[in-house]
Amino acid sequence: MEKILKDLLYTPTHEWVKIENNKAKIGITDYAQHSLGSVVFVDLPNIGSTFGQFDPFGAVESVKAASDLLMPITGKVIAVNEALLSQPELLNDDAFANWVIEVEVSDAAEVSKLLSPEAYQKTLH
Amino acid sequence: MDMKITCLHDRHLKLGAKMTEFGGFDMPVSYKGILQEHQAVREACGVFDCSHMGEIDLKGTDAVKFLNEITTNDFSDLKDRQLQYTLLCEASGGVVDDLMVYQYNKEHFLLVVNASNTTKDFKWLTSHQSGYQIELSNDSEFFGQLALQGPKAVEVLKGLIPEVESLSFMHFDMFQWKNHEYIISRSGYTGEDGFEIYGSPKATVELWDQLMGLQVEPCGLGARDTLRFEAGLPLYGHEINGFITPLEAGLSLGVKLQKPFIGRDVLLKQKEQGLERRIIGLELLERNIARDGYIVYDANQKMIGYITTGYMIPNTSKALANAMIDSNVKIGTEVYVEIRNKMVKAVIRNRKFYEKKYKKEV
């Protein structure tokens, strides 16, 4: 059974977001890392770039395939988790502890389009 | 469409394999993980269920003539109990399929074809058989197939069937184990020493179970693809298809232009006039992965081709690819692969990604 954390919001495409004040950390879910298998590469965006809600901002790649990462919420990238460049497998070890990017949130009202842990859970099985 | 299953389907599910559709079959992609399975085959050994592949029996006094005129390779001098790689081409030179042909004797052969092409190939062969004294039979359902691959494959298999040790690369014979009969060839699709083992579905399941008991790593289609890619071997639908000729795919060793066969005129012309494009290697110079279908550009942003297969080689950070590239672009040229709207720098190189370990002498 895949882990789902209660204090996060989710996208139907298996990203999680943790919003604190006007900043948000974004990552992939345990379900996502499990269905991808071994993550061998994470394509991270440039710091300073801005993406709209549900726009692709990067990708996680398993041996077999690339999966786009979609923005849970519109924002400007203020940090990327550089450890993932040399150790992409951290996402397999713990997808919730290892965030992918941090953004500055521009429109907090957009969270209404995200899934609660319970709603996300329902999309999985 | 209902997916077909192989005789080992329940074994795959019990092992918890990740499954996917391939060639109309529900097949395992991986069991414990592609990285581990790839490494097992390179360093020890692994076993693949290849029962989805097609087996077509060819019999008759015109069998050699038929193979010579329908396929690209020459079977005149092939010896009994040898196998040979060949291709079926359309008149356009495009590839219908690539296949392995096992010669029982000059009037009896077994053709092993890609799962996704079995029906098409059988139709293609039978539509060209008139005028030849031959019989064709699609026996795919009666065969299971295992590929036991890796440097330890011989140790494992000779523990069950001691005589297999004396087979050399691209040779086969018939063997008995536990009242079952197997056709076993020293061959494979990984670049390692190993065996391809054909038997009835029941014989295949029993041998699989025995190999699992011997702790042989079960390997799925994921590792099968990374291994064949690294070994420079083509995959139908990627390096070859109906719009790519064997010469463009770098398969001239399997093409004998001195004899007539379907597609020869186009291939002869390509050889005389030179190829306009060909499959070549490519290595990314920045950290990323070039995938099938991505477009390749030169330094002036002119499109020069596309990726046919690309991986980050398991357990390394080397991102390599096969690409169909304009022949004017030489080895050593810096090019760009478009990946998610970014131009990622790469260099054209040869396709010798891995030194093959075939057992040519025993």
Image (cartoon, coloured by chain):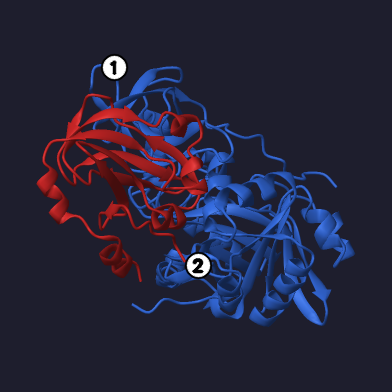
Chain colours: A red, B blue
Tag 1 residue: B299
Q: Quadrant of residue A75?
A: top left
Q: In which quadrant is the N terminus of chain B drawn?
A: bottom left
Chain ID at mark 1: B
Q: Position of residue B99 (x, y in %)?
A: 54, 58
- Residue A44 numbered tag: none
| Lateral position of residue A45 relative to residue B22, left or right | left
How packed mark 1 is, by other alpha carbons closer than 10 Å (few <14, some 14-19, many 20 or more), is few
CA gap, disc 2 to disc 1? 41 Å
The residue at which mark 2 appears reads as B27
Disc 2, SS? strand
- Type of residue at label 1? Ala
Residue A53 in percent (x, y) is at 16, 44
Residue B166 place in picture, x, y as percent: 86, 55
The answer to whether dots 2 and 1 both sit on one chain is yes
Note whether B47 is above or below B248 in the view shown: below
Q: Nearer the viewer, residue B194 or A63?
A: A63
Left/right of residue B145 with respect to residue B297 in the rendered view: right
Q: Residues within 10 Å of mark 2 (few under 14, many from 20)?
A: many
Frontmost of labels 2 and 1 is 2
Q: Is residue B45 left or right of residue B161?
A: left
